[in-house]
Image: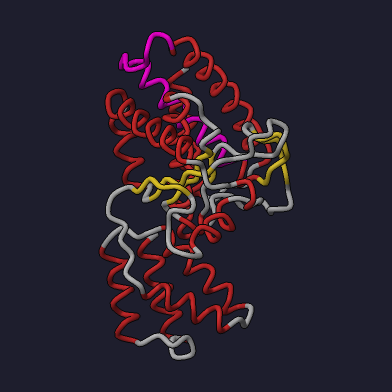
């Protein structure tokens, strides 16, 4: 993903850098920086918004975004922070690119934020103990875990977590979406799985179905495009694998074992439902077929 971002930025700055007010030497520095080390999800987001601004002939906006891309972007380690705990303008970008209804992602109060941070720390500790490979992979895939507070009204439209191709390396967690450590560990495996699939899409889609074609999805009540069904089915297998390894390691608290087994059974049902839709209606690229076969192979072995 970084290589693609670097190569595309190199091309864009070569074509319209002068119009964007970008010095060639500075452009070369940024491109080299991107190739050399992990990047902030915000840098990906600023790039996509810059391209959209160029395509819409909004050159003042494009120049501002190009200037933002030139700024140093430290992405060392995994950052856990509230939605508003970032530079001016970034919170609204994260809301725009991560969820369809930006108003759903409010700043959590201090108590809710502290409780969520503690639960995330405990979830990583659980994964470190029971499934260290998954814990390590999550830390490699994600650069930011963004915490927001969804609506308190139980009847309101809300979210548990969200990820976006245009903010690669970030995931949004609802501070009210998970209430225990086991759920949070699964949410981390789930959302990092979306980022993994986005990475597989660096050279093209995993499915060939048109976005207008919608189907039943295992994790959503509303019909979804095949890409959404594919994602949901894959991450269900990833959550199943995570729970299986945690249970087998003995890391799950005995008091949580019954709930974990119930979740495991639900993941089995949801995977079967999603995979049936993919088998019947999915038009997969060769890479898409290869990716979903890995999930099928795992679920078959787990059964």
The way the protein has been coloured in the rendering is: secondary structure
Magenta stretch encompasses residue 242: yes
Judge whether residue 199 is colored magenta. no
Given residues 44 and 172, the one toward you in this image is 172
Give residue 210's quadrant in the image: bottom right
Residue at the far front in the pictured view = 110
Residues 46 and 240: in front is 46
- In magenta, the rendered stretch is 229-255
Q: Is residue 234 above or below residue 50?
A: above
Image point (27%, 24%), residue name: 129
Q: Is residue 108 above or below residue 57?
A: above
The quarter of the picture where the N terminus appears is bottom left
The residue lying toward the viewer, choosing from 139 and 217, is 139
Q: In which quarter of the image is residue 248?
A: top left
Does residue 46 lie above or below 246 as drawn?
Answer: below
Left or right, 116 with respect to 162, comes to left
Main SS, magenta region, reads: helix
Quarter of the rendering containing residue 39? bottom left
The x, y position of residue 154, in whole percent, is 68, 30
**In the picture provided, is 65 more to the left or to the right than 126?**
right
x, y percent for residue 95: 56, 54
Seen at 29% across and 85% down, the residue is 25
Q: Residue 65 in the image: x percent, y percent?
A: 48, 75
> Is 27 positioned to the left or the right of 184 in the image?
left
Instruction: Return the x and y of residue 187 as percentages of the image width and height.
Output: 47, 33
In the image, what residue occupies the spot 32% across and 74% down? Answer: 30
- Taking the spot 49% from the left edge, 78% from the top edge, the residue there is 64
Residue 213 shows in this picture: yes
Above or below 259: residue 31? below
């Amino acid at each position: 993903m970084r290589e693609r971002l670097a190569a595309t930025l190199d091309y864009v700055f070569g074509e319209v850098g002068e119009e964007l007010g970008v010095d060639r030497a500075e452009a070369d520095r940024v491109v080299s920086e991107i190739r050399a080390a992990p990047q902030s999800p915000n840098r990906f987001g600023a790039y996509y918004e810059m391209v959209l601004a160029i395509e819409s002939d909004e050159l003042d906006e494009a120049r501002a975004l190009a200037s933002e891309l030139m700024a140093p972007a430290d992405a060392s380690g995994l950052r856990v922070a509230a939605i508003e705990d970032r530079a001016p303008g970034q919170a609204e970008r994260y809301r725009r690119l991560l969820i369809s209804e930006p108003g759903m992602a409010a700043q959590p109060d201090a108590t809710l934020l502290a409780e969520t941070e503690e639960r995330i720390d405990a979830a990583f500790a659980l994964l470190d103990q029971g499934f260290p490979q998954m814990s390590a992979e999550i830390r490699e895939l994600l650069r930011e875990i963004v915490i927001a507070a969804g609506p308190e009204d139980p009847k309101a439209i809300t979210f548990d977590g969200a990820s976006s191709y245009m903010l690669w390396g970030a995931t949004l967690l609802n501070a009210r979406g998970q209430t225990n450590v086991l759920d949070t560990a699964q949410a981390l495996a789930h959302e990092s799985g979306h980022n993994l699939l986005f990475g597989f899409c660096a050279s093209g889609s995993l499915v060939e179905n048109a976005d207008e074609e919608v189907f039943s999805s295992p994790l959503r009540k509303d019909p979804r495009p095949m890409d959404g069904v594919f994602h949901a089915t894959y991450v269900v297998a990833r959550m199943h694998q995570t729970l299986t390894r945690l249970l087998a390691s003995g890391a799950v608290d005995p008091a949580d074992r019954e709930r974990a087994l119930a979740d495991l059974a639900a993941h089995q049902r949801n995977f079967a439902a999603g995979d049936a839709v993919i088998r019947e209606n999915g038009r997969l690229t060769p890479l898409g077929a290869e990716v979903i076969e890995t999930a099928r192979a795992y679920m078959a072995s787990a059964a």
